[in-house]
Image (tube, rainbow, N blue to C red):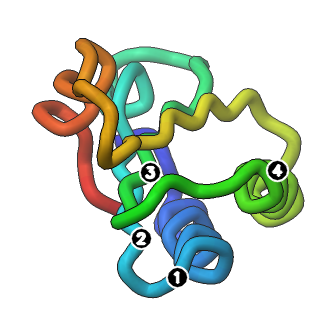
Amino acid sequence: MRLRDWERAAIADTARDVFGQDARVRLFGSRLDDSRLGGDIDLYVEKPCSPDDHQRRLFARLLQRRVGERSIDIVYAAPAYDKGSIDQVARAEGVLL
């Protein structure tokens, strides 16, 4: 996994700060492959109810402050949504932070 310990902690803490203690965040995509270079940070956020627009913007803004200006892609699991392929990949291959 190509994230430092403090980066993993910052992402998980930010998710709990914004979405509550029951929020879970998974890292998936190219950052899981230690043999690769670069790439954006792909996050999959799960919580019992869908986050509102304010929470989504706040989470993204706080992440940029806490881990630095990077390309971060955030996918939100929607409880009432028929899970698509990105959800399946993130859940199957993602690492819980």
The residue that label 4 is drawn on is 57
Q: Amino acid at mark 4?
A: Arg
Tell me the element at label 4.
helix
Q: Which residue is mark 1?
A: 20
Cα gap from disc 3 to disc 2, whole angstroms: 7 Å
Instruction: Answer whether labels 1 and 2 touch (C-beta < 8 Å).
Output: yes
Tell me the amino acid under the disc marked 2.
Ala
Say which quarter of the image contains residue 46: bottom left
Distance between the Cα atoms at labels 1 and 3? 12 Å
Gap in angstroms between the C-alphas marked 1 and 2 = 6 Å
Q: Which residue is mark 3?
A: 45
> Which secondary structure, mark 3?
strand
Q: Nearer the viewer, residue 13 or 18?
A: 18
Q: Position of residue 73 (x, y in %)?
A: 61, 29
The residue indicated by pointer 2 is 23
Q: Mark 2 vs mark 4: which is more N-terminal?
A: 2
x and y, in percent, of residue 7 in the image: 59, 61
Residue sitting at x 19%, y 38%: 91
Left or right relative to 69: residue 53: left
Q: Position of residue 10 (x, y in %)?
A: 61, 70
Q: Amino acid at mark 1?
A: Gly
Q: Earlier in the sequence, mark 1 or mark 3?
A: 1
